[in-house]
Image: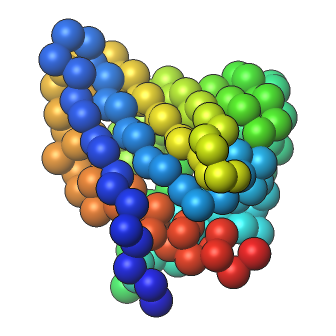
């Protein structure tokens, strides 16, 4: 296990029910994009340490859909959504639903920006339908999963 030197910034917008996550990686936008779109890579880094991820369905293309399940100590948490726009190395727009709260659908946008030196800045925004929903999303422990997940992604990217 390695410790990341990169900061994950998570900001709740005061004017709209949106969370913005920004993180830089020592890898190209194409490599970071690939880790978000190929299920065999995704299961190696998504979520906090200690959770196991299983992909039940994955059709990562504009108009496609996905479903994955994370488990720990016999508990399972399922997530699903639809891909609205997938542009390789550049952008993913998708919906995101935790099946335990099926009425709380987020619209997510992930932009992969090329930085000097073959690096990437990933900016993710999650828009939900209310400030209460956004605050519940943030209070759910999302920060731990995002920070640890991106640390794990650093490890996957470093391994090639």
The answer to whether residue 141 is left or right of residue 20 is: left
Which residue extends farthest top?
15
Front-most of residues 27 and 101: 27
The quarter holding residue 26 reads bottom right
Residue 114 is at least partly visible in this image: yes
Specify the quadrant of the image occupied by residue 111: top right
Q: How is the image coloured?
A: rainbow
**Image: 114 above or below 152:** above
Name the one closer to the observer, 149 or 60. Answer: 149
Residue drawn at 40 percent across, 71 percent down: 4
Can residue 112 be seen here?
no
Residue 93 location (% of width, % of height)? 63, 27
Percent position (x, y) of residue 135? 17, 33
Q: Residue furthest front?
A: 117
* Residue in view at x 39 percent, y 60 percent: 6
Q: Looking at the rendering, in which quadrant would you find the C terminus?
A: bottom right
Q: Please state the horizontal and vertical placement of residue 78, each as a whole percent of the image.
A: 51, 56
Taking 79 as reference, is 77 left or right?
A: left
Where is residue 19 drawn, in percent x and y?
32, 31
Vertical arrangement, residue 154 with respect to residue 103, above or below: below
Left or right: where 86 falls relative to 115: right
Residue at 71% from the left image edge and 67% from the top image edge: 41
- Residue 84: quadrant of the picture: top right
Q: Nearer the viewer, residue 153 or 93?
A: 153
């Amino acid at each position: 296990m390695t410790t990341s030197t990169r900061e994950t910034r998570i900001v709740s917008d005061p004017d709209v029910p949106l969370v913005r996550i920004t993180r830089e990686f020592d890898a190209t936008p194409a490599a970071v994009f690939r880790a978000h779109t190929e299920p065999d890579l995704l299961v190696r880094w998504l979520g906090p340490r200690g959770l196991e991820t299983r992909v039940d369905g994955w059709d990562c293309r504009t108009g496609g859909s996905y479903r994955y399940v994370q488990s720990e100590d016999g508990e399972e948490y399922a997530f699903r959504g639809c891909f609205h726009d997938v542009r390789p190395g550049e952008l993913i727009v998708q919906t995101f639903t935790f099946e335990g709260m099926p009425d709380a659908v987020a619209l997510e946008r992930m932009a992969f920006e090329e930085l000097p030196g073959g690096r990437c800045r990933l900016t993710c925004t999650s828009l939900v339908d209310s400030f209460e929903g956004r605050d519940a999303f943030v209070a759910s422990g999302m920060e731990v999963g995002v920070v640890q997940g991106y640390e794990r992604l650093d490890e996957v990217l470093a391994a090639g």
